[in-house]
Image (cartoon, rainbow, N blue to C red):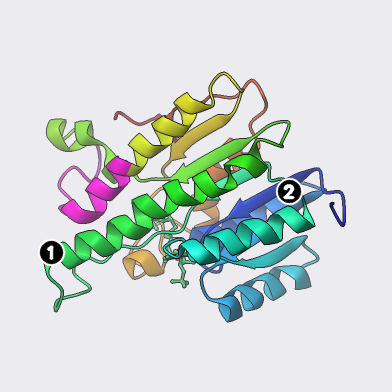
Amino acid sequence: MARNSPSTIVLITGANQGIGFGTSRKLAKENNGWQILMGSRNAENGEKAAAELKQEGLSVEPLTIDITDDQLIERAVKEVESKYGRIDVLINNAGIANEGRRPDWSTRQMFKELFDTNVFGHHIVTENFESLLAKSSHPRVIFVSSVLASIHSLVEKQREFANVPLPVYRSSKTALNMIMAYWANKHKVDGWKVNSICPGWIGTNLNEYQGQGTVESGTIHLATMATAGKDGLTGTFSDKEGPIPW
Ligand SMILES: NC(=O)c1ccc[n+]([C@@H]2O[C@H](COP(=O)([O-])OP(=O)(O)OC[C@H]3O[C@@H](n4cnc5c(N)ncnc54)[C@H](OP(=O)(O)O)[C@@H]3O)[C@@H](O)[C@H]2O)c1
């Protein structure tokens, strides 16, 4: 049974740095009674990140979860189940980008590593937490995708970044949107809100801090979707400007 009684329990994967860290801070700061579980694949980094936010008086705690490791995922589910018995919001945020960073790797190796994290990991985490989400009165699942997932934008060259190459990363986010659609469709009748979002082009470790937006700006749309009510949208792909073409 629950130790405390938070009104909303949020799990964010990859929350020890970047957009996941910023979103942990924003959601905890702006929503009284919310408990944020800050996922981190490295326990020490997770402890450090959570300690920083706890010092600010925020209600957060670290949770060790490597989304490419099934045993760690199962262990994390058991830990959350025994402490809280449910989760209300799952933010599938962890991600990597390896193109241009692994000159010694073959394209096949890059595809395998990237899809294992950016696609398989999120589906498997969602599958494992499905029963805890089902115990929420208002389940929300957010997949952190990217405008780079948009096939339309590349073919029609209508949006920013139409000329960015990155076939491995781009196709992983396109596949992630299909995974999102699967979960949205599966739980539409149950009222779950399942959506993909793009945080914007944000300066983080992922892009060697070349992104122009601040982490704070990258958390805005995520927080909007995480706090959406029962009348919120489901099965969408958007950024803070609105819908992104598939
Ligand atoms: N930054 C942008 O411009 C941008 C734009 C569009 C979408 N996104 C997406 O936003 C999300 C967050 O990225 P970010 O920009 O905040 O990058 P970041 O600062 O590099 O953060 C990525 C986080 O994911 C974690 N992670 C990586 N592999 C993992 C695994 N196997 N298991 C668990 N955690 C793992 C990292 O852990 P470690 O610290 O251990 O590496 C880190 O905490 C990603 O899905 C990314 O694709 C970012």
Q: Amino acid at mark 2?
A: Glu
| Disc 2 from disc 1: Cα separation | 42 Å
Give the vertical position of 119 relative to 41 (above or below). above
The image quadrant where one finds ligand 1 is bottom left
Q: Amino acid at mark 1?
A: Thr
Secondary element at image label 1: helix
Quadrant housing the C terminus: top left
In-image side of 128 versus 175 (left or right) = right
Viewer-proximal residue among 61 and 70: 70
Q: Is mark 2 within 8 Å of ligand 1?
A: no
Secondary element at image label 2: helix
Magenta extent? 159-175
Q: Give the labeled residue for mark 2.
A: 30
Q: Residues within 10 Å of mark 2 (few under 14, many from 20)?
A: few
Expressed as whole percent of the image width and height from the top left, the position of residue 161 reads 23, 46
State the mark number for residue 107: 1
